[in-house]
Amino acid sequence: MAWRSVGANNADLIRQLRDYGVIASEAVANAMIATDRKHYCPRNPYMDAPQPIGGGVTISAPHMHAFALEYLRDHLKPGAHVLDVGSGSGYLTACFYRYINAKGENANTRIVGIEHQHSLVALSKSNLNSDDASMLDSDRMLIIEGDGRKGHAALAPYDAIHVGAAAPETPTELINQLANGGRLIVPVGPEGGSQYMQQYDKDENGKVQMTRLMGVMYVPLTDLRS
Ligand SMILES: C[S@@+](CC[C@H](N)C(=O)[O-])C[C@H]1O[C@@H](n2cnc3c(N)ncnc32)[C@H](O)[C@@H]1O
């Protein structure tokens, strides 16, 4: 990938993503600068590549987190409900929180990370607390343990949904939990096969339109290994 790079520190990594045009907006850059990857990524935090975080999974590459924030940013408003499916390390969940909070504090804001691996739920909470404990201390951020393919109905509908692992086909349950005017971005396609990052926009009348954004390579959303 042309923009693959290594930063000397977090701010330098984000500067490079801006220089390469991956980050287009100041507000996305600021949320990523404020969220130092060292709290979420034990190895090579400032390299633009996925890195192992335990549980057999990786934290996604910084450029994919940047794309997710850019595609969803118009839906990240004070008071929004946001769902991060397969929240893993907690990094992107923290970026969503910071992006929205920088726009204005609102008691109705809810940023929900949902992750099915118990060990990663614990890890992400510890990461988030080492970054800034006030995020989880507020009732505006929650990390839920559960099957993200079913979403989290208790806080639906969502203005923005991000999915960090591939759905084999159209994720109907998540689309059902999207608010009118909301946006879902999700990799869709078979494991190891042709996958696309797909965007689903639900209009004010509840009509859904799908747009293919780019070819991607993601691990699948799975059942828990027993
Ligand atoms: C590529 S990792 C990305 C993690 C996270 N977005 C990050 O960058 O740290 C995919 C995540 O999806 C989680 N996952 C896979 N299937 C899931 C499911 N059915 N429900 C919830 N989480 C799931 C994995 O455990 C893993 O943490």
Image (tube, grey):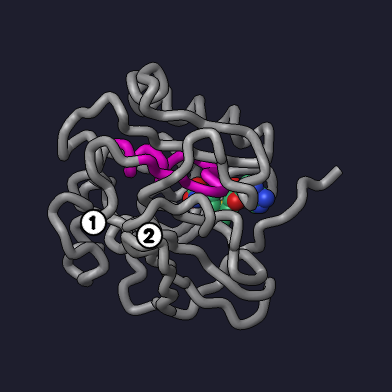
Q: Residues within 10 Å of mark 2 (few under 14, many from 20)?
A: many
Q: Residue furthest right?
A: 226
Where is mark 1, residue-wise?
74
Q: Position of residue 14 (x, y in %)?
A: 24, 54
In the image, residue 41 lies at what x, y percent? 47, 43
Q: Quadrant of the C terminus?
A: top right
Image-based side of 139 in relation to 75, left or right? right
Residue at position x 52%, y 31% in the image:
143
Q: Nearer the viewer, residue 157 or 2?
A: 157
Tell me where the magenta segment starts and ends, as one range: 81-97
Q: Which numbered disc flags the more N-terminal residue, 2 or 1?
A: 1
The image position of residue 167, as x and y in percent, is 62, 65
Helix, strand or loop for disc 2: strand
Tell me residue 39's x, y (percent).
Answer: 41, 34
- Marks 2 and 1 sit apart, C-alpha to C-alpha, by 9 Å
| Residue at image point 66% right, 69% down | 168
| Camera sees residue 38 | no
Name the residue at 53% across, 68% down: 187
Q: Are marks 2 and 1 in contact (CB under 8 Å)?
A: yes
Q: For residue 88: magenta? A: yes
| 168 relative to 176 in the view: left or right | right
Callout 2 amino acid: Arg
Would residue 217 be seen by someone viewing this image from the given angle? Answer: yes
Are there few (<14), some (14-19), or many (20+) residues within 10 Å of tag 1? few
Type of the residue with mark 1 = Asp
Would you place residue 180 above or below residue 112 in this image? Answer: below
Residue that badge 2 annotates = 183
